[in-house]
Image (cartoon, rainbow, N blue to C red):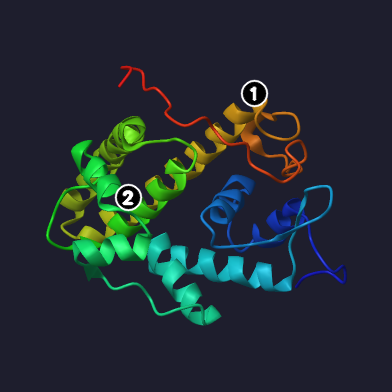
Amino acid sequence: MVSQRSYLSIGDVLSLLREEFPDVTISKIRFLEAEGLIRPARAESGYRRFGSADIERLRYILTAQRDEYLPLRVIRQRLDALDGVAAPEPETMGRSELLAAAGADEVLLAELEEYGILARTRQYGTGALSVLRSAVALHEYGIQPRHLRQVKAAASREVSLVEQVAAPLGRRNGSPDPALRAARDVAGHIARLHATLVEDGLGQAGLASGNPTPGGQADVPGEARSGGVAPRVARGLRSASGR
């Protein structure tokens, strides 16, 4: 139950939910916000302000992850349906449909395929759509497909790490369920760790508001330094290889 105050801080939310969801952390809440699943308001100082609707939305997400082992993509579709936003994206789509849904052009998609970020195929799933939409947004900052090779390589290494942990569980128990649960749990922890390390790294580089904090557990005012506008990166970033 939310207190009589009109909003709660991220620390208050953590205290409120931790008994029901022991694995919840500030980093996970931030990650869910970064993924667009929750949208807490911001005070003028930049601090997050969670209302009753935000708390219930968080409970819904955390319950779906814990009890149904649902990936964020499916949870997002359910939330969109509840919000009456739009019909869920089709599970598969052709090349032209993919480009139209992502607002991308053929050149960008071809480059993503050239550098191994996406596989060229006759039918594309919602995962490909999400990747292409992110690439469109990053392209506005001068981040081109060739720069995303290191992101793809890091993701592949994380997948290998999850496989090392989860695959033996499936062989040992003769059922895929323990392996699936372990894979989703480990992948979730890795994603939250990754988000925290990036956030702390930006703080160390002076590219995040407030002072960097060990473990990323402190809530810092957002957009305090930048005035709410993200700085644009110069177009044509150079990769380590100079390509």
Question: Residue at the top extreme?
Answer: 241
Check disc 2 and report the residue beneath it.
183
Give, as a three-letter code, the residue at label 1: Gln
Quadrant holding the C terminus: top left
Question: Residue at the right extreme?
Answer: 4
The percent position of residue 53, horizontal first and vertical second, equals 68, 73
Horizontal side, residue 53 vs residue 21: left or right: right
Residue 26: mark in rendering: none
Please tell me which residue lies in front, 151 or 233. 233
Residue 204: mark in rendering: 1
Up/down of 19 relative to 230, above or below: below
SS under mark 2: helix
How many tags in the picture?
2
| Residue at x 33%, y 17% (from the top left corner) | 242
Horizontal side, residue 111 vs residue 155: left or right: left
Please tell me which residue lies in front, 58 or 23. 58
The percent position of residue 175, horizontal first and vertical second, equals 19, 60
Quadrant holding the N terminus: bottom right
Up/down of 139 relative to 16, above or below: above
The percent position of residue 34, horizontal first and vertical second, equals 56, 51
